[in-house]
Image: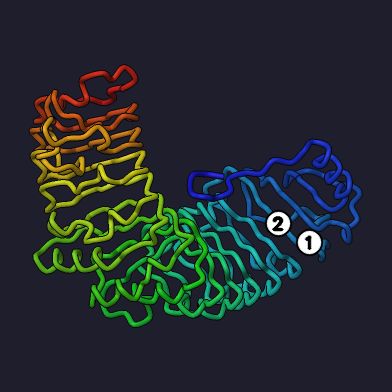
Amino acid sequence: MDNYGKVENCKMHDIVHDFIQFLTRNECFIIEANRTIEKLSSDSVYHLTMMLAAEGPLSLPTPFQTCRKLRSLTIFNARRDTRIDGDLILQLKCLRALNLSRIGVKEVPKEIGELLHLRYIDLSFNYDLKELPDAMCNLCNLETLHLEDCYSLEKLPKAMGKLINLKHLYVGGCWRLSGLPKGVGRLRGLRILDRFVCGGGDDKEILELGELGSFEHRQGTTLSIVGLGNVKDAREQAQKAQLEKMKYLLKLTLDFGINSGDQQRISDEEVLNALRPHQDLKSLWVSYYEGCSTLVFGNWIMSLQHLTHLTLKEFSYCESLPPLGKLPYLEVLQIRSMVRVTKVGVELLGIEETQTSPATATPTVIAFPKLKQLYFFEMENWEEWEGVGDDCQVTIMPCLSSLSIELADKLKQLPDFLLHNRPQLQFEDMR
């Protein structure tokens, strides 16, 4: 399990593994496409994993073409282009799970809509796949659809609302996806949606940001919201999204897109101030925000008392940094491409200037008590990093083990609190 509660792998005892293999020796096959198989009971094969030949269309070896009870099919190959024949799909009427990940699929045949028993489809990492057939929306029993990193995918079928049993929809890394169809908002059983694309323009068929609030039972731990700079009726839509009710959400990305103009800055401020996440959030990434520095996080950033990872990138109009030193569990902080920041002062530490004097400071004050890794990248106008003085009794970054500063050529020197009594601190990319 990773830092955000996602199960990454499971371990099975060797004896249990061998026993299961023995029990399923006639049900599960792993073969090469050009391999010759002499004896095979077609009624006994339920699960097939196939390594494709270097060339030619995707087809089942002859003995498997009569396996009418096949429940799962996984294809592996090293090609860049795999053509799926519609006739092959029609041989798989009993299929429950289909894995076509990373095999260079450019087009999914419409015959896939005939596989009415399908529960699981993985089409991820097919970089040239541009669209899905409308017939896929006939798969009324489909529960999981993986489309991660299909870079060329531009749209999803309009009739997605017909997938009444869909629980998991993964579209992370689909950079060209212009929006989600309205039908997705009607999927009341949807538990996991890893990426929400805010469509621009007046397309009435695209799901709006406010409709994200309809996923009241969403259980995914990771969510990326992109295109926030395109949102119309910004404040109202952001409030309707109700991120604060997503109690399972641990990792959140808010991407405003690359925009400009005074009106855009006002819109970004309204959206960010209204997008208050649940207080248990652990990781936050905010990028391309064009609001002013005094309203960077509205009034909610300090409520994230469990936050461990924070990245702020491309804040075009930010001239100072928020008091992040008050976050008690923050371990990793990245500040990237803040072109208007010329000075980093004690405001970042979350302490008042009066607290830096020996007369008022107390040993119990700790700024960044858990911070381990600190990164600054592409701070082209950053000239000064203010220290606190040798007599200051405030403890600053006691756990810091790694500091990286890259592409900040104007910075003259490091603050005093980073230079004294730091035997474990590693300086990386100091250029």
Q: Is residue 222 left or right of residue 274?
A: right
Q: Position of residue 411 (x, y in %)?
A: 11, 30
Task: Name which residue lies at 40% across and 55% down.
Answer: 281
| Closest to the observer, 267 or 32 | 267
Mark 2 neighbour density, 10 Å: few (under 14) some (14–19) many (20 or more): some
Residue 73's tag is 2
Q: Residue furthest front?
A: 359
Element under disc 2: strand
Q: Amino acid at mark 2?
A: Leu
Q: Is residue 162 left or right of residue 32?
A: left
Q: Image quadrant of residue 249?
A: bottom left
Q: Amino acid at mark 1?
A: Leu
The tally of labels here is 2
Q: Where does the C terminus fall, quadrant-wise? A: top left
Q: Position of residue 207 (x, y in %)?
A: 38, 76
The residue that disc 1 covers is 70
How far apart are the alpha carbons under marks 2 and 1? 8 Å
